[in-house]
Amino acid sequence: MGIREQQKAFKEAKKAAKEFKGKPGIKDVQFGYKYTNGVRQPELCLRINVDEKKPKKDLKKREIIPAKISSFYTDVIVHKVSPQNVNVSPSDIIRPVLGGLQIQSNLFGNNENWGTLGCIINLNGKVLGLTNYHVVFGNLDEIRAALYVGNLTMLQPQRTFYGEVIGSVGDIFNKELDYSTIPLTAQYNIHQTINMINGIINTNGYKIPEIGIRVFKIGASTGKTYGIIDGRSCFECANLIIAQDINMPSVLISNYGDSGAVWICEDNGDKKIIALHCGGIVAENIAYAKAYSSVYNSIIKKI
């Protein structure tokens, strides 16, 4: 299925998913690959993400998910996503700064709430580090987070390993899209964007997500891992699901400490950012991310 056909199918999927929004027990409806006995199939379907699966005999008639909705077959799944911003493995002080390194907000104590500096972006002359909102602010709402702007510093690596300040938290962030920016005061690498990836990645643009695209990221916990865009939320279109790429060497797609990393794809020989990693399900080897197109456009509006 080409990208135009997939975009058309996604529009149909969003329309079909509307009847499930707000229903008790249903967290999301995803447009993505169908799985049979844990094996990914080539066909796309509507995946109904529920709090828990129940035997059909325990369901009321109105609670039973039809086998087919519109032109899509359905698949009932249970995904319980956890933020991946806590870990206790060591890291070094790296200067000049670049993406893929361990960072921590001084809002938190030793071994608490650290994550990954995804990359360094240069937009309209502003040089900013990019990571997750929850890495910087935890569960604070945006009103309380705004009180820390300019006063909250970011450390690299975390304070347990004598992290040094690389900048103060800026006023460009969004909790819903789970991103936060860091105006850098530390020297940054002008020859390399992300650790373990040679050269400069053009962050002033993006690749539109497409089911089936192969991607990779550099997380402060797992290093370089590989995935495939496996699904997309019909409720919140920026929400992407990334599964392990079984044809590549990495075993664990992500782990605690990877929050804030960016997912990269190859596009006609160029490397482009396609998503911002924000959580996962370690036991199922699934990652959750926000489409970088949404993050990028949100940042541009605030600069």
Image (cartoon, rainbow, N blue to C red):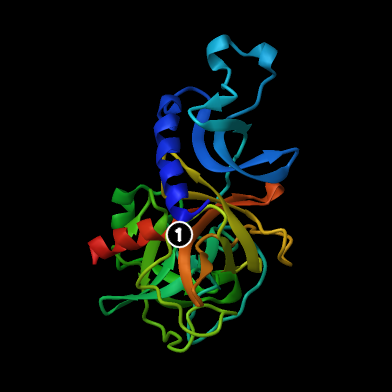
Comparing 112 with 204, the one in front is: 204
Task: Name the quadrant containing residue 10.
Answer: top left
280 relative to 183, above or below: above
**Whole-percent x, y for residue 267 in the image:** 49, 71
Q: Is residue 172 visible?
A: no
Task: Name the quadrant containing residue 148.
Answer: bottom left
**Whole-percent x, y for residue 220 in the image:** 60, 69
SS at badge 1 = loop
Comparing 72 with 252, the one in front is: 72
Q: Is residue 229 visible?
A: yes
211 relative to 30, above or below: below
Residue that appears at 71% across and 47% down: 283
Tell which residue pokes out farthest to the bottom in this image: 191
Mark 1 surroundings: few (<14), some (14-19) or many (≥20) residues within 10 A:
many
**Whole-percent x, y for residue 212 in the image:** 57, 55
In this rendering, would 292 be left or right of 221? left
Where does label 1 land, which residue? Answer: 132
In this rendering, would 263 be left or right of 176? right
Comparing 22 with 156, the one in front is: 22
**Whole-percent x, y for residue 260 in the image:** 50, 62
Residue that appears at 54% across and 58% down: 113
In this rendering, would 227 be left or right of 263? right
Q: Amino acid at mark 1?
A: Asn
